[in-house]
Amino acid sequence: VVMIGQVFAAPVRALIAFGSVGSKVVEGYQASYALLIGVSRYTSGWPKLESIPKEMAEIEAALKSQGFKITQVMDPDGDELEDAFEDFIDEYGYTPGNRLLFFFTGHGHSREDGMGYLVPADAPDPRKDQGGFYRRVLSMSRIMTWCREMTATHALFLFDSCFSGTIFKAK
């Protein structure tokens, strides 16, 4: 999260690429859009994450100051989580000049085989209801598919979903 402020401290309007033949100007971005998704109020057994609303506000302010148009989704259920990604990509992901930022903060889950998932507010604990869990979560493989299909100039995906600060509450 600290890096976001540094990454967007100087907005890019045009890039100059240097090579063995000299330099050439590469066009900047047509527009900048960010999808911010935060899940703090879990309803099916996952611990609540109290710091997320404040973090989301700080990230939104930093991105807005750099010219991003923001779409924010708080505490989505499984259907709303998938719809948020699909709607955002449908709206902005197929315009080649766009710069996109996707940010998810909340719980994540990884299987033993390494497959990762974003956990929406209504997903049950997979140790108690594995079928219900997989019906609600959003897989990283689905996100990779969207990534490959988009034609936007740049897309950056950021996921803050390991422990999200709960390790400090446990200690």
Image (cartoon, rainbow, N blue to C red):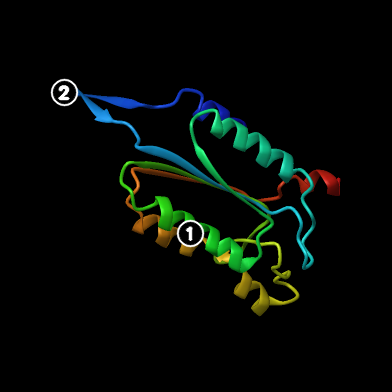
Q: Nearer the viewer, residue 141 or 98?
A: 98
Residue 115 appearing in the image = no
Q: Residue 95: x and y, percent?
A: 33, 48
First reached walking from the N terminus: tag 1 or tag 2:
2
The picture quadrant where one finds residue 158 is top right
Vertical side of 50 occupied by 85: above or below: below
Tell me the residue that label 1 is attached to: 87
User: Which structural element holds mark 2?
Assistant: loop
Q: Residue 26: x and y, percent?
A: 25, 30
Tell me the residue that label 2 is attached to: 20
Residue 122 appearing in the image = yes
Q: Residue at x 79, y 66 (%)?
A: 45
Which residue type carries mark 1?
A: Asp
> How would you rate the neighbour count of disc 2 (Cα within 10 Å): few for under 14, some for 14-19, many for 20 or more?
few
Q: Residue 128: x and y, percent?
A: 75, 75
Q: Residue at x 76, y 43 (%)?
A: 51
Left-right relation of 91 to 58: left
The quarter of the image holding the C terminus is top right
User: Which structural element holds mark 1?
Assistant: helix
Q: Residue 58: x and y, percent?
A: 66, 34
Vertical side of 24 occupied by 121: above or below: below
Vertical side of 124 occupied by 117: above or below: above
Q: Residue at x 62, y 36 (%)?
A: 59
Which residue type carries mark 2?
A: Ser
Vertical side of 25 occupied by 159: above or below: below
Q: Nearer the viewer, residue 5 or 108?
A: 5
